[in-house]
Amino acid sequence: MGLFDVIKPHISSRGVDEVMSELSRRGAFTDTQKKFVRAVLETDLDLTTSAGSSERGVDEEEIKEAIGRFRGSKLFSDGQIEILEELLRLKLRRHGMF
């Protein structure tokens, strides 16, 4: 990593765990929905790692794609999508810290 390399904000594996805990705390998501969210986000974590990135995590572009998958799944209401998007963007802005 060079002196001027820019590390893109991302959500780490730990950050995904924290998002999942927050979804459980809010109680507005079924176990099936939470499993789907985790599966989508963990797939992005795995793809990021295998792409050779020095930073393992879900970046902004992957969050946009994940939100699209959540919408396309028909498992979530519009309100639930808004909650997911809010939590993921908040986590991204804080770069893995809740």
Image (cartoon, grey):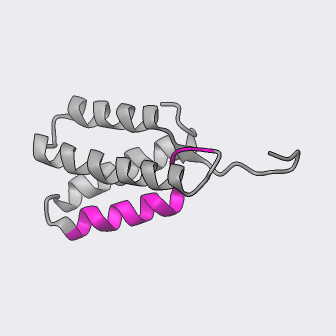
Front residue of 65 and 77: 65
Q: Position of residue 49 (x, y in %)?
A: 52, 49
Q: Position of residue 50 (x, y in %)?
A: 51, 53
Please tell me which residue is depicted at 39% across the width and 39% down the height of the picture: 16
Please tell me which residue is depicted at 62% across the width and 51% down the height of the picture: 53
Please tell me which residue is depicted at 17% across the width and 58% down the height of the picture: 76
Q: Position of residue 43 (x, y in %)?
A: 36, 53
Residue 96 located left or right of residue 27? right
Front residue of 75 and 81: 75
Residue 8 located left or right of residue 41? right
Find the magenta span and give its range.
55-72
Front residue of 21 and 4: 4
> What is the quadrant of residue 74 in the picture?
bottom left
Q: Is the stretch drawn in magenta largely helix, strand or loop?
A: helix
> What is the quadrant of residue 3 in the picture?
top right
Residue 17 located left or right of residue 50? left
Please tell me which residue is depicted at 36% across the width and 37% down the height of the picture: 19
Q: Relative to 55, say whether 82 is above or below.
A: below
Front residue of 77 and 62: 62
Q: Taking the image as drawn, is residue 30 in sight?
A: no
52 is within the stretch colored magenta = no
70 is within the stretch colored magenta = yes
